[in-house]
Amino acid sequence: MTNYISGDFLKSVREECKLTQKQLAFQIGVTDKAVSKWETGKGYPDITLLPDIAKQLGISVTELLSGECNRNTNKSANMRKGKFYICPVCGNVLFSTGSVTASCCGVTLIAAEPEEPNTEHYFSIEKSEDEYYVTSRHPMTKEHFISFFAAVGDNGVSIVKQYPEMNARARFKINRTRDIYAYCNKHGLFKVKVK
């Protein structure tokens, strides 16, 4: 069986926290020999210990399992560089202005890479007074549909959820909107710059 946590990662984070193996072991109620085995790949911790290990190391369980720490180095978040993360199981949508390790329904989420709309995924954007009116002729069946439209500006993001068997449409305030996105549950994320 392969380890579900990286011994090298565990060791590097422990050392960043300026903890010895003995100190970490004491804090989570195991021996320093157990911690040594985990770090050298000769064993792995009981899954019930993961929350305690993560807490002592100042990271999340998700970071511990993924072997990646996401430190906030982006102190002045840029909305236009934000990323969408969409759960393939339940359709949950997350938006982040910096690097994250995110999971939902037991799945580690990967940032969706937007593409330019193609013929099948074209959506029209019309100005209507102080709003953008977004529509799509995309099929809206239970198996294949636009899951959401989103507008991203320099001051925020607005997401309008779409549902199968309804017309795909949304309205967004024009003020400060820079990009509009559409997400197809089968083919991914599409983006159009509006300013």
Image: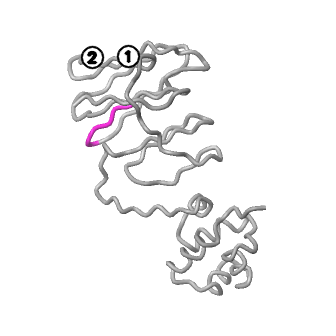
Residue type, mark 1 in image = Thr
- Disc 1 crowd rating (10 Å Cα; few below 14, some 14-19, many 20+) is some
The kind of residue on which mark 2 rests is: Glu
Q: Quadrant of the N terminus?
A: bottom right
In the displayed structure, does residue 189 sit left or right of residue 124?
A: right
Q: Is 88 above or below relative to 37?
A: above
What percent of the width, then of the height, locates residue 118? Answer: 41, 21
User: In the picture provided, is 131 more to the left or to the right than 86?
Assistant: left
Q: How is the image coloured?
A: one colour
Q: Is residue 76 magenta?
A: no
Front position in the image: 185 or 169: 185
Above-or-below relation of 30 to 1: below
| Residue 126 image label | 2
- Is residue 19 found left or right of 81 in the rendered image? right
- Which residue matches tag 1? 135
Q: Nearer the viewer, residue 126 or 123?
A: 123
User: Magenta region's main secondary structure?
Assistant: strand
In depth, the one of 83 and 122 nearer the eye is 122
Give the magenta-colored segment's residue range.
150-155
Q: Quadrant of residue 164?
A: top right
Q: Residue at x 71, y 64 (%)?
A: 3
Q: For the residues labelled 1 and 2, say whether their Cβ atoms are less than 8 Å apart.
A: yes
Residue 127 is situated, as x and y percent measured from the top left of the image, at 24, 18
* The quadrant where residue 171 appears: top left
| Residue 153 forms part of the magenta stretch | yes
Query: In terms of secondary structure, where does tag 1 sit?
Result: strand
Q: Is residue 144 above or below residue 38?
A: above
Q: Is residue 175 left or right of residue 57?
A: left
